Each structure stands twice: as C-alpha cells, then as structure tokens.
Image: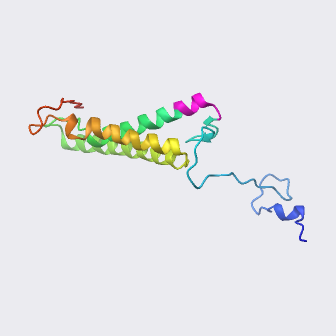
Amino acid sequence: MYKASSKEFHQPTAWNTTGGGGIHVHHRAIAHMTFYWGHKTEILFKGWPGSSSGMYALALIFVFTLAVIVEWFNYCSIIKPGTNKVAAGFFRAGMYAVRSGLSYLVMLAVMSFNGGVFLVAVAGHAVGFVLFGSRISKNSEKKPDLPAINFKC
C-alpha cells in the first residue's frame, strides 16, 4: 500500500523574500463550484457574513438592493435637455462606470455559488425592472386601468 510522505504536501517557493528559506506550506481555500444552500458562506468580503443568520439576511438584503440600483441606473436619465454636451458626456461616462462597478459586485456575489444569493440577485433585477423599466412604471396610453408608478430621476 502506498503511503504519502509529509514532504509531498509541501511546495517549495522560488520567490521566498522572508529570509527564512526552506519549504512553506500553502493552504488551499475550499471554494464551492456548485450551488449550495445555507447561511454559512462568504459573500464579497473575507469572513462576511460568516456563520451568523442575521448577517446572512443582511447580506441578502444588500445584494437585492444592489441589483435594484443596477436596474435604476439602466433606465435612469437625469440629464436635462440643453445641457452642455461635453459635460453630459462625462457625466454619462461616470454613471456608466458606477453602474458597471455595481453590476460586477452583484456578479461577484452570485459567484459565491450560494443559492439564496442567486435568488435575491435575480429577484432584485426583476423588481428593479418592474419599478424602472416596464410599462407598469410608465404612463401608458394603451393600458389606462393600470396604476401609473412614475419613477423619473
């Protein structure tokens, strides 16, 4: 029977700048590569939300809110007609950069592979679309019996 020696689990490093020399042990982080359910997870930051159910709920609310804000940025137009075109261009570029950054944060949260995070991200995008991008939120002449929710920026 084969028995592994303790030296097989050590990786020597060629870039040792600590001056101690020798062999260093590298620990590999265990990352989920499939969806899993549970509140013991890490989302966006090391150690957050940890194993606390309350902090997990806060993390879900945070991801949901980020997704809604991303949708708001998608459908928001706060530049008034007649504004200087150069200033408006820089402002739009800045808003685009913020929207892209928030979108990447939602994507990184989903990449935690936690099922709850995935569901609240999708729900946040759906709610944001209903609030800011659908006909329900806009004054529509075709369907006057629907209540008009007007969220203009």
Q: Residue furthest left?
A: 141
What secondary structure do most residues of the magenta stretch adopt? helix
The x, y position of residue 29, in whole percent, is 69, 51
Furthest-bottom residue in this view = 1
Q: Which residues are magenta?
A: 51-58
The part of the image, by quadrant, that contains residue 5 is bottom right
**Residue 99 on image: x %, y %:** 37, 43
- What residue is shown at x 28% (from left), y 38% (from top)? 130
Q: Position of residue 9 (x, y in %)?
A: 82, 61
* Residue 78 or residue 59, whichever sits in front: 59
Q: Is residue 32 left or right of residue 111?
A: right
The quadrant in which residue 71 appears is: top left
Above or below, 48 against 26 in this view is above
Q: Residue 52: within the magenta?
A: yes
- Which residue lies at the image location 36% right of the left edge and 36% below the top edge? 69
Quadrant of the drawing holding the N terminus: bottom right
Q: Count up the numbered dots.
A: 0
What's the residue at 46%, 48% (across, down)? 107
Quarter of the rendering containing residue 138? top left
Q: Give the farthest residue toward the front.
A: 145
Residue at horizontal 50 percent and vertical 35 percent from the top? 60
| Quarter that holds the C terminus | top left
Coordinates of residue 25 in the picture (x, y in percent)? 80, 55
Seen from the viewer's position, the closer of residues 124 and 153 is 124
For residue 19: magenta?
A: no
Tell me: residue 138, above or below residue 112.
above
* Visual colour scheme: rainbow
